[in-house]
Amino acid sequence: MAMNAEPKMPTEGCSHGGCDATPGSDPTGDKPLGGVKLSRREFAKSTALIAAAITAAGCGTSALETFKQTRLREMSHDELKAFLVKLEKRYEARFGTHVDVRATPHAEGVKFAYALDLSRCIGCRRCVHACVKENNQSRPNPEGTHNNPIQWIKVLEMDKEKGIDLNEAEPYYNPAEVPREGKFYMPVACQQCENSACTKACPVQATWKEPDGMVVIDYDWCIGCRYCMIACPYGTRRFNWGEPHLPKDQLNTNTHVLGNRPREKGVVEKCTFCIQRVREGRYPACVEICPVGARKFGNLMDPKSEIRAVLETKRVYILKEDLNTQPKFFYFFGV
C-alpha cells in the first residue's frame, strides 16, 4: 500500500476543500443561523471579551487554546506538524512517557471495508479486549473515581432458531460458557457508513468520512453535545462522561491523531477500523486476534482482495439496510 510522504488532512464533505460550518450553524450546512457566516477562528479573534471571560472564570490557558483551536481539516501542513508536537508534549506531561502521534494520510485508490462470518464467531469477546488495548479506551478504575470504562465493540448472543433479532439479543451473556448450544454471536461496532447519519447531525462538523471510508472524529473540535450518538442507528458511539482512566503501563504509545490517541473528558469516540494500523498496511487489532478467522478486512477497490471475494461469493447481510446508511461493515454466513 503506497503511502504519501507528506501528512495532509482530507477535505471530503467540505466544499472547495474547506469547511465553514461553525458552532451554532445550520447542521444541514445550507446556511449559518442568523444569516452571519463566521468561522470559529474569526469569531475567536474578534471577541477578546469572551477570552477574558474564560480567563476570569478560572478555566486557564488550556481552555483558551481549545477555544481558539483550528479544526484539523483546516490546518496547513506546518500547522498540523506543530499540532502533533503539541499533542505529544501534552501526553508526555500526562503519562510521563513519549506518545507518538501521527497523521498518516489516506492512500489513493483505497476504500476499506469489513466482513464478519457469523457462522464462525464463537462469542469469545477477544476482539473486544484487543480493541480496548489497541485503542487506548478508558479502563475500569479500581478506586472507583471517574470510573468510565469504554468498549467500542458489543457482542450480541442470539438464538439460531430466531435468526438475527436485535429485540431478543443478549449482550450480557457469560463469555466463559461460549459457544452455547443453539446460539450464535453477532459483534457490532461502528458500521463506517457511506451515508452516515452521525456526520450530518454534528452541529460543528467535528466528525466526517475520510476518502478511504472511515468515519473519524476531531476530538479537539467535538463539543460533547452527543447529537451524533442520537443520530447513530447502531448505538456504536461512546461518550466520556468522566476523565478516562488509562494507566501508563496500559498505554499504547503508537497513535494516530484521528484514531487511538488518548481522549479527554466530554468527547465522543468510536471504532475507526484501527486507522493507526490500516494506514500503515496492517490489519485492525480485532482481525488479528480472532481465534477462528471470522473477521475479514480489505480494500473494496481491489478486485483481488479478500473483502471483494466475500461480497462476490457470499450472501451478505447489512444491518438495518432499510435506513440507507450504506455501511461498509457486512455480515455473512460462510457455511
Image (cartoon, helix red, strand yellow):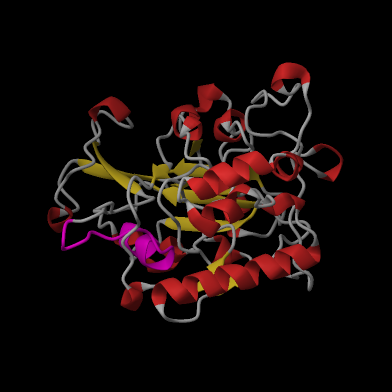
- What is the span of residues highlighted in magenta in the rendered image? 128-144
Residue 266 seen from this side: yes
Q: Is residue 333 left or right of residue 165?
A: right
Residue extending farthest to the bottom is 97
Most foreground residue, 52 or 82: 52
Q: Position of residue 17 (x, y in %)?
A: 83, 45
User: Image quadrant of residue 4?
Assistant: bottom right
Q: Is residue 314 left or right of residue 292?
A: right
Q: Quadrant of the N terminus?
A: bottom right
Residue 252 seen from this side: no
User: Image quadrant of residue 195?
Assistant: top right
At horizontal 41% and vertical 61% (from top left) the residue drawn is 286
Residue 133, magenta (yes or no): yes
At horizontal 59% and vertical 46% (from top left) the residue drawn is 52
Q: Is residue 27 left or right of residue 38?
A: left
Q: Position of residue 141 (x, y in %)?
A: 21, 61
At horizontal 71% and vertical 60% (from top left) the residue drawn is 106
Most foreground residue, 268 or 301: 268
